[in-house]
Amino acid sequence: MTTFLGMPATAPRGVGHLRGDQPFPRAAHDALGDSQLRRNLRHATTTIRGKSGRVIAELPDWQRLRDAGSAIKADVMSRLPDLLAELESRVTEAGGVVHWAADANEANRIVTDLVRRAGSERVIKVKSMATQEIGLNEALEDAGITPVETDLAELIVQLGDDKPSHILVPAIHRNRSEIREIFLRAMPGVDPELTDDPPVLAAAARRYLRETFLSTSVAVSGANFAIAETGTLGVVESEGNGRMCLTLPDTLITVMGIEKVLPTWRDLEVFLQLLPRASTGERMNPYTTMWTGVTPGDGPQNVHLVLLDNGRSAVLADTVGRQALHCIRCSACLNVCPVYERTGGHAYGSVYPGPIGAVLSPQLTGIEDNASLPYASSLCGACFDACPVKIDIPSMLVHLRDKAPHPPAERAAMAAAAYTMSRPRLYAYAQRAAKMARIAGRRGRGLPPPLSGWTAGRDLPEFPEQTFRDWWAQR
């Protein structure tokens, strides 16, 4: 085995979906011009926020649950290697096989080889951010294997030759009329008289998937949680498609980010209260499926767990940035973010959009490859208030902005400011000179070129008639 935890390499280029084709400002500008997209996003996020707020208000100990979730995740990060070794041992004892994948290329190779070994040319998939992250579908297709997404939203994205736009609701950017058009165009055997009534659309997807469930021998899943003390893996979902994938096939392959491990079943109790309320606005997930290794004669008889690093050790090495690994993929931060609500997920260029994507993706890839994402925020703090495990996303955004590469002109300006502010007499002269800004630029509230770019989207604070130094000297 060539993979070892603790080698802080970033996710490789040329594979997976962590890097966009253009920086966030340019992509966001294009998204802002799509009025239908903005209406879809506003309706969806407003609905989810309302549902979530109502069920959270039912719990008098919600803040204590958040504290517990945050503490458990911090404990996991502090002893992650030991917990992963324990998880591997327990999964193996239960009849499963554990594979360690350093990056996306290695994970894709492992899964492809396992599917070939099972003799299958098709796999059914449970919704999984990890497999989207590594571009598993593309790797399988290149190997002549057909992946079939069974989550309704993921199926819509796949049939529409699209990309996910939301962590929880990948097709949030589509309305039902658009979904109807996708089904008519790309779903085999669909009724040409199909309407856009949601139950009718769901029934069409169910008919399409039923034969696939019953005739496919290999499934690929993600995992919301893994319990180190027993080697148990778990998936929570709302439609029942996951239960079908996790119980019917003979071979089950789970691709899981190494940060998803929890020490004990007692810890899981906390997250099964936090996750559904923060994500879907439900008191509990309709389907919670847990499995431990192989049970002879019942369920999958070949169980594999692929533990994925793909830059996570690099994130773990940053004592500030490692908070991003606490994320339980609930999407609460996306649903309250004013930037996400107006641009959608595609503008972020990564499978992880919104506030959490703005701090996680740059760390997984290296800040140079996603340098614009830490600026995709107003720093309003709504994401921190909404996060069920209290990830301090605003502080991480500032931390990553400091690490991001800056243009030479900006570096020179900051160096000049630092030089001036560290010398009292020079700073006093600068204060007097700054009064000239009252008559410079747009209505006295901008700056002249080449500094005008900074004030194109913000007003320059008005300088006072009298500085503190002058006021003090007169007294």
Image: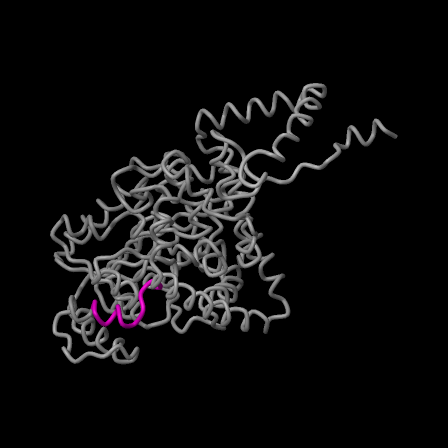
* Closest to the observer, 95 or 410: 410
Q: Is residue 240 left or right of residue 452?
A: left
Q: Position of residue 88 (x, y in %)?
A: 37, 49
The residue positioned 20% from the left and 70% from the top of the image is 183
The residue positioned 45% from the left and 33% from the top of the image is 404
| Above or below, comparing residue 2 to residue 152 in the picture | above
The residue positioned 27% from the left and 72% from the top of the image is 177
Numbered label tally? 0
- Which quadrant: the C terminus? top right
Q: Position of residue 113 (x, y in %)?
A: 18, 48
* Closest to the observer, 127 or 313: 127
Let me know if residue 210 is in the magenta part.
no
| Above or below, comparing residue 175 to residue 223 in the picture | below
Colour convention:
one colour
| Above or below, comparing residue 329 to residue 52 in the picture | above
Quadrant for residue 66, please give it: bottom right
Quadrant for residue 14, please give it: top left
The magenta segment? 172-182
Determine the main secondary structure of the stretch shown in magenta.
helix
The residue positioned 14% from the left and 77% from the top of the image is 192
Q: Is residue 429 left or right of residue 359?
A: right
* Closest to the observer, 60 or 53: 53
Q: Name the residue furthest right.
A: 475
Let me know if residue 173 is in the magenta part.
yes
Q: Is residue 206 left or right of residue 275?
A: left
Q: Can residue 78 be seen in this snapshot?
A: no
| Above or below, comparing residue 286 to residue 30 in the picture | below
Q: Position of residue 180 (x, y in %)?
A: 23, 72
Q: Is residue 239 left or right of residue 142?
A: right
Q: Position of residue 263 (x, y in %)?
A: 49, 53
- Which quadrant: the N terminus? top left
Q: Can residue 51 be seen in this snapshot?
A: yes
